[in-house]
């Protein structure tokens, strides 16, 4: 079938995109490559479509399908979307992605190359032809181009060659693409998705969550949009969740199970009810966690996979818990996050805990966690780690917001109800980084958790890089008790930089004591869960590579994410963990896109600020293309993803 006919079929609703397909993920360099291949008449592969009844075809977009049998694209979406976008000058009805990937394509009549518009390079040069204008106008546009070229004496001698090349470019619309169909009563959604996974040239298979959502959208087409809208609302509040995570919560509410297959037989009404119930209880859970524990944004919301369990429990309780029950649930959540309960084998772990919850309630969950962990009391050694990505970093933040911690500049308490979001607090290095590096200390030593505290921005700026032996006496004089409220050892001799190691050890002991006190508060006297210590020799501390070491680094990473969002690209995962075969975290990547900046099409990418070569080697071995500066990453994006060499 000719390309022009296929585009007509898309317009008429005879060809569409199945609901389970992901959105458009190609970038400009793939679009250039596609048109270069078509221009040279190289094969680009055929299309695979699912021929099915229009009345039962769950498709993307709000366009009405033609009556009778329609063809849903299983393989060829990226190619056909690109062809449609360039040749029609607009995206198709089923489009979900970045229009900039196919906007402004130009063809050079002399060099016979395709590039995207660059004003300085192409303005006023008649040899650069707008491909979209030519395709939309057909022979009329070809005639206009010939007229412009013939008026230039320097080009007139080559006019016949240029006319031939313009005609060849226009002829792309007449190229035949082979279309293979799958059809028949035995072609159920499960079978079709399996076929899709086997032939999908992008290489990224549909997840179990994708399949479950496809089945839901087959009967409730608005489901994906409603879920995305809800995720956007949470994002505006500082929380980053994805569709799989939300669907997991819907599943636990409806079925009490973690595996997505249990959603397959749910009716549209049931799923809508489940989504409403799950959303309501997620809001309740986030309010409880933020209000009682002070964990009020994504960076400190460790253990987010424990939330579906909490959602299930709250839904069963009608969202109403007394104070003791509420705090015990929060105790379990914080402990689950602190010990990394869901850091590996997430679905299996969730299934087990849902079954335990059903049989034994909250006490059953806590007993299961105790047996798995081998003791829940904090020890000084748990604060031995370093970086803002460490699992116990949120514990330090939680203690600050729950307890009596006070700001060293104003003396006010740093409770969550007084300060709101994390943006008003900054991580403060008690011993300044510059002074520690001057003493030849390593990055992990400089950025030790026990050297962190949280202060207001003004206080942090005012302290600057002064040493504790200098500014601590001033703080204690103006705000007596403020130092101790942040678990500072009060022996002035430990405030000297020569005693930095001893200061850390003393503060770790104070931090562990405070953590156990705060956890005990959540148990309201039922402290049997804190009585047991871990077996001798047991340790949870595994030396990991990498980690965000300062507020400045975090701000730079978030700035990169904002820059990418402005260009219609996905933001990366901050403190992305790499695990070994046993599921143990062995490294943290500052900012990472494990599926690439174009999901399934571009290589995994990582931004590693101020990291050593050992981490870069490990990340590279894990398949990541690594960048050591945000400038280098931006250059890569502009050159290879968006082809926008005019922006910076």
Image: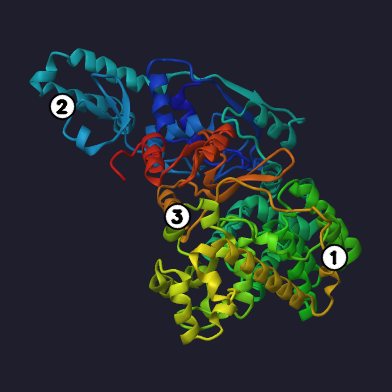
**Quadrant in the rendering for residue 180:** top right
- Position of 608 with respect to 230 (left or right) is left
Specify few, some or many for label 1: CA neighbours under 10 Å numbering under 14, 14-19, or 20 or more.
few
Instruction: From the viewer's side, name the closer residue of 451 and 578.
Output: 451
Q: Where is residue 20 drawn, in percent x and y?
A: 63, 41
- Decide: is 465 above or below 93: below
Mark 2: which secondary structure? Answer: helix
What's the distance in space between the residues labelled 2 and 1, CA to CA? 86 Å
Name the N-terminal-most of marks 3 and 1: 3
Numbered circle sitting on residue 267: none
Please name the residue shown 49% across and 78% down the image.
Answer: 408
Residue 46 visible in the shown view: yes
What's the distance in space between the residues labelled 3 and 1, CA to CA? 39 Å
Instruction: From the viewer's side, name the closer residue of 491 and 362.
Output: 491
Query: Label 1 belongs to which residue?
Result: 532
Numbered circle sitting on residue 148: 2
Query: Label 3 belongs to which residue?
Result: 437
- Decide: is 30 above or below 517: above
Please name the residue shown 31% across and 45% down the image.
Answer: 648
What's the distance in space between the residues labelled 2 and 3, CA to CA? 65 Å
Name the N-terminal-most of marks 2 and 1: 2
Specify few, some or many for label 3: CA neighbours under 10 Å numbering under 14, 14-19, or 20 or more.
few
């Amino acid at each position: 079938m000719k390309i022009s006919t296929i585009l007509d079929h898309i317009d008429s609703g005879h060809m569409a995109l199945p609901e389970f397909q992901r959105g458009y993920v190609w970038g400009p360099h793939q679009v250039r490559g596609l048109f270069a291949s078509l221009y040279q008449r190289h094969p680009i592969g055929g299309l695979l479509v699912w021929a099915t009844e229009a009345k039962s075809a769950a498709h993307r977009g709000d366009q009405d399908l033609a009556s009778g049998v329609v063809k849903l694209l299983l393989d060829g979406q990226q190619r056909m979307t690109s062809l449609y976008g360039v040749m029609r000058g607009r995206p198709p009805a089923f489009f979900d992605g970045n229009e900039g990937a196919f906007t402004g394509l130009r063809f050079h009549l002399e060099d016979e190359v395709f590039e995207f518009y660059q004003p300085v390079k192409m303005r006023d040069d008649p040899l650069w032809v707008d491909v979209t204008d030519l395709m939309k106008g057909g022979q009329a546009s070809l005639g206009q181009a010939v007229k412009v070229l013939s008026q230039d004496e320097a080009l007139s001698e080559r006019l016949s060659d240029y006319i031939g090349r313009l005609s060849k470019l226009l002829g792309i619309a007449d190229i035949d693409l082979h279309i293979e169909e799958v059809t028949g009563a035995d072609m159920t959604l499960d079978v079709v998705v399996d076929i899709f996974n086997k032939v999908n040239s992008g290489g990224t298979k549909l997840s179990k969550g994708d399949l479950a959502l496809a089945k839901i959208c087959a009967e409730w087409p608005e489901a994906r949009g409603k879920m995305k809208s809800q995720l956007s609302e949470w994002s505006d509040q500082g929380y980053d969740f994805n569709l799989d995570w939300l669907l997991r919560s819907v599943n636990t509410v409806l079925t009490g199970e973690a595996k997505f297959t249990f959603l397959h037989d749910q009716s549209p009404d049931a799923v809508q009810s489940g989504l409403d119930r799950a959303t309501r209880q997620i809001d309740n859970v986030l309010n409880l966690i933020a209000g009682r524990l002070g964990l009020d944004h994504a960076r400190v919301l460790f253990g987010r996979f424990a939330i579906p369990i909490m959602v299930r429990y709250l839904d069963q309780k009608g969202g109403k818990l007394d104070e003791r029950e509420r705090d015990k649930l929060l105790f379990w959540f914080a402990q689950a996050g602190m010990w990394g309960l869901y850091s590996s084998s997430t679905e299996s772990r969730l299934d087990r805990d849902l079954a335990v919850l059903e049989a034994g309630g909250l006490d059953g969950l806590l007993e299961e966690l105790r047996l798995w962990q081998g003791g829940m009391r904090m020890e000084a050694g748990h604060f031995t780690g370093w970086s803002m990505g460490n699992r116990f970093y949120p514990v330090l933040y939680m203690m600050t917001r729950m307890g009596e911690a006070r700001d060293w500049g104003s003396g006010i308490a740093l409770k969550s109800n007084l300060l709101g979001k994390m943006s008003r607090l900054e991580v403060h290095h008690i011993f300044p980084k510059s002074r520690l590096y001057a003493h030849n200390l390593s990055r992990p030593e400089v950025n030790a958790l026990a050297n962190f505290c949280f202060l207001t921005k003004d206080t942090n700026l005012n302290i600057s890089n002064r040493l504790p032996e200098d500014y601590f006496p001033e703080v204690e004089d103006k705000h007596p008790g403020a130092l101790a409220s942040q678990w500072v050892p009060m022996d002035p001799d430990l405030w000297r930089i020569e005693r930095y190691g001893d200061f850390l050890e003393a503060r770790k002991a104070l931090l562990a004591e405070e953590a156990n006190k705060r956890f005990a508060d959540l148990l309201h006297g039922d402290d049997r869960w804190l009585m047991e210590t871990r077996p001798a020799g047991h340790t949870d501390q595994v030396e990991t590579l990498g980690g965000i070491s300062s507020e400045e680094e975090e701000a730079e990473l978030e700035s990169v994410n904002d820059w990418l969002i402005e260009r219609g690209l996905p933001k990366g995962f901050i403190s992305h963990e790499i695990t070994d075969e046993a599921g143990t975290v062995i490294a943290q990547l500052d900012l990472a896109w494990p599926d690439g900046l174009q999901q399934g099409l571009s290589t995994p990418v990582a931004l590693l600020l101020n990291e050593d070569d050992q981490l870069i080697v490990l990340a590279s071995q894990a398949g990541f293309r690594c960048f050591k500066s945000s400038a280098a990453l931006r250059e890569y994006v502009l050159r290879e993803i968006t082809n926008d060499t005019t922006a910076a």
